[in-house]
Image (tube, rainbow, N blue to C red):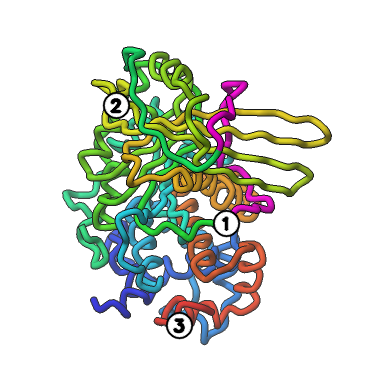
Amino acid sequence: MQHNEQRDLLRALAAVPDPRHRRGVRYRLVSLLAVAVCAVLAGATTFAAIGDWAADLDEAARRQLGFLGRIPAGSTVWRFLVRIDAQVLQAVLTGWLRHRLPARPVLGRKDRMVIAVDGKLLRGARLPDGRHVHLLSAYDTDTGIVLAQVAIAAKSNEIPAFTVGAQGIPLAGRNPLTQFPWSPLAMDRGWSLAVRGTGPTSARAKSSTEERAGQGNGGRTSSRMPPLPGPALVVPQRNSVSRSQRNAVSVHITPLLDQLRAQVGSLAGTIIVADALHAQVGHAHAVNVRDGQLMVTVKANQPTLHPQLKQLPWAQVPVGYRTRDRGHGRRETRTVKALTVATPGGLGFPHAEQAVRITRTRTASGKTTRETAYLIVTLPADAAQPDQLGDWARREWHIENRLHWVRDVTLAEDAHQARIGNGPAVAAVLRNTAIGYHRSNGEPNIARATRRANRRTHDLISAVTSTPRTQ
């Protein structure tokens, strides 16, 4: 398949395996999938809404999507979608979206693609045993495209899904991620410090509560860094988990990290920034063996490492980077300090090169609060400067603010009571695709973009079935 052909939605969807029996098939697989994708791009929030949108198409629009006769009933579309392999569909649609992007410049040594990773509970969707559906996603903060998504296994959590995968439908001996045309394949208290920065040498931290360094953009007065092309992974916080949960493993679905590698070709040059839930030795090793890097928040779930980070002589470390924000009725100042601990054994966490402290001082309604977050990063000082560390920490929240919030509020995900088969995960994939499509077209407001797409049905269908990027 040529590059331009991969930008045609109908041609791209041909890579999805058809779950139906060959006998009695009335509608082409690519047409059914394409009408579902277009309907969600136009704001459909349920399977019933997808069927209604399809039923309202005129004859010209139906022909563009490959329907030669009557349009399928809503129940037919629903029965088909709940049988589709959600992981494969996500890989196909991610590849399609990425091929519609302009070519990225060659990455420099310090340029990194920031990928935010986080789990989300689908509150309206329940499994037969009453549990909610839980999905773990990896989000490219530069383009707004979800690169990979896996379902969390039963009686498990995000930790094993991050590196080992979640239980799902067997793929009949194939690995579809490699078949698509776009898949490239502790300290002794006697420390010595390597410190850098241009700010003052004092600025002591007065509390040890975590800083949400990436929340809100406000009105930044500091110079904004250019987008960092080459991957970095970002994951929000969760409570600590039991040993049995950490040991829960399932191998029926390709690990999230391997899905990422299948999409981007290599994790070399990537920085994976994760919350405290993913401050796990196994994660550090898994990222390292795949040639990636890790930046992770450290909290009390690491009872040895967290006190070590707090006891470092931060008062002697100059401020390496500072930003000031004003907006939403508050003023915030963020300072970033980073140091290299050069004692034998380092911080006692595998592959850790630097310790980072981010302090946020907020003034709102006459009250001033100060919060502090501690992080570790597996990149050395010459490859990760304080301004980059601060930017990566803030990008951790892009997946919450620009993906999960939009799925809930604009696309009504939590209100959608999809409970049959793969329906919940497939619906999430379609929402991911809609958000990624509109973000990659430069749309800052997804609600407005979906309304426009719904008003201009022919423009939408022409855009996704041909080579131009924009509507």
361 left or right of 55? right
User: Is 17 part of what is drawn in magenta?
Assistant: no
Asked where in the image residue 334 lies, by quadrant, the reply is top right
Choose the circle earlier in sequence order: 2 or 3: 3
Task: Tell me the magenta residue range.
Answer: 200-222
Asked where in the image residue 241 lies, by quadrant, the reply is top left
- Checking the image for residue 342, the label placed there is 2
Q: Residue at x 48, y 47 (%)?
A: 387
User: Is 219 part of what is drawn in magenta?
Assistant: yes
Q: Residue at x 26, y 46 (%)?
A: 258
356 left or right of 22? right
Mark 3 Cα within 10 Å, few/some/many (few <14, many 20+)? some
Amino acid tagged 2: Ala
In this view, which residue lies farthest toward the bottom?
Answer: 60
Asked where in the image residue 290 lies, by quadrant, the reply is top left
Choose the circle earlier in sequence order: 1 or 2: 1
- Checking the image for residue 223, the label placed there is 1
**Front position among marks 2 and 3:** 2
Q: Secondary structure beneath disc 3?
A: helix
Q: Residue at x 42, y 66 (%)?
A: 33
Residue bearing mark 3: 64
Choose the circle earlier in sequence order: 1 or 3: 3
CA distance for labels 1 and 2: 31 Å
**Front position in the image: 254 or 47:** 254
298 left or right of 193? right
Where residue 41 sits: x, y (%)? 54, 66
Amino acid tagged 3: Gln
**Front position in the image: 146 or 294:** 294
